[in-house]
Amino acid sequence: MRKLKEYAYYRGDEFVMIDTIQEIAEASKYKVKTVEGWRYPSQRKRSCNVLVEV
């Protein structure tokens, strides 16, 4: 079985949670595609939400 990557989710400078992209999307009420975009530097400039791989 393949282990899913975990990410730390930050809203601005505030730490929110550590979990998979799917779980973060469900908890934050965003679509999975939106949450996936937070991993990229180009999207970090446009949004206060950030994902960092743990």
Image (cartoon, grey):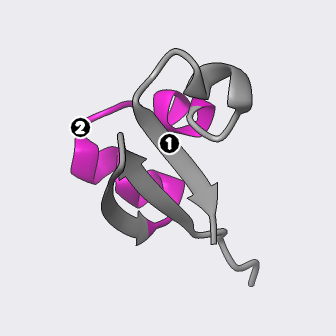
* Amino acid found under the numbered disc labelled 2: Lys
Is the residue 40 above or below the residue 7 in the image? above
Kindly identify which residue carries mark 1: 50
- The magenta-colored residue range is 19-37
| Residue 42 x, y percent position in the rendering | 70, 20
Please name the residue shown 71% across and 30% down the image: 41
| Residue 43 x, y percent position in the rendering | 61, 22
| Residue 34 x, y percent position in the rendering | 49, 27
Q: Residue furthest bottom?
A: 1
Is the residue 46 above or below the residue 4 in the image? above
| The image quarter in which residue 19 lies | bottom left
Locate residue 39 relative to residue 11 in the image: left or right.
right
Secondary structure of residue under mark 1: strand
Secondary structure of residue under mark 2: loop
Locate residue 13 relative to residue 52 in the image: left or right.
left
Is the residue 27 above or below the residue 38 in the image? below
Q: Residue 8: which numbered mark, if any?
A: none
Q: Residues within 10 Å of mark 2 (few under 14, many from 20)?
A: few
Query: What secondary structure is the magenta-colored segment mainly?
Result: helix
Q: Residues within 10 Å of mark 1 (few under 14, many from 20)?
A: many
Q: Residue 29: which numbered mark, if any?
A: 2
Residue 35 falls within the magenta-colored stretch: yes
| Residue 54 x, y percent position in the rendering | 63, 72
* Amino acid found under the numbered disc labelled 1: Val
